Amino acid sequence: MPEGYSGEGFFATKLDSVVGLARANSLWPLPFATSCCGIEFMATMASHYDVARFGSERMSFSPRQADMLLVMGTIAKKMAPILRQVYEQMAEPKWVISVGACACSGGIFDTYSVLQGIDKVIPVDVYVPGCPPRPEQILDGILRLQDLVKTESVRRRSSPEYQELLASYNIS
């Protein structure tokens, strides 16, 4: 701390740091679970693993009240437009975690009807591998997302790079 900027009851910091810390410790998850990964996520939410310790205890089943989308399980190509609609209904800032081999890459289902990774329709921030991933892996994915959110600039969402990323997915 520079002299004169610290004292009892206050400290100086950057606005980005404070906003990032607040956002990272109050992520509201929206589970989009279709298969066995959803069962592992239920275990993650239960008392033994208790994701509430990380500020994510309030499950949101409305996209308009969530900022962290957890896509878990096999996503059929017919379901891709619904997943995209859910993503688009979420308010900015929003983050996506792809949980399990099926959501990350189609898993063992290399068929015409299964989407070979959700990153074909929406941008993904964190990938959690496994078939199905253990609750510890899901918690690790949430912690990695928290690290990303803490360091993200408040202005990132209006940057040309972010607008270009959304444009590559045809999201306005």
Image (tube, grey):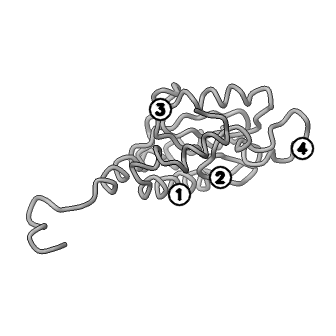
Which residue does the numbered mark 3 point to in the structure image? 91
The N terminus: image quadrant: bottom left
Q: Secondary structure at mark 1?
A: helix
Which residue does the numbered mark 2 point to in the structure image? 127
The answer to the question of whether label 4 and label 3 lie on touching residues, with beta carbons closer than 8 A, is no
Quadrant in the rendering for residue 16? bottom left
Closest to the observer, 45 or 66: 66
Q: Secondary structure at mark 3?
A: loop
Q: Earlier in the sequence, mark 1 or mark 2?
A: 2
Q: Earlier in the sequence, mark 2 or mark 4?
A: 4
Closest to the observer, 40 or 75: 75
> Residue 144, labelled with which disc?
1
Closest to the observer, 85 or 143: 85
Q: Residues within 10 Å of mark 3 (few under 14, many from 20)?
A: few
Which residue does the numbered mark 4 point to in the structure image? 110
Residue at 41% across, 45% down? 55
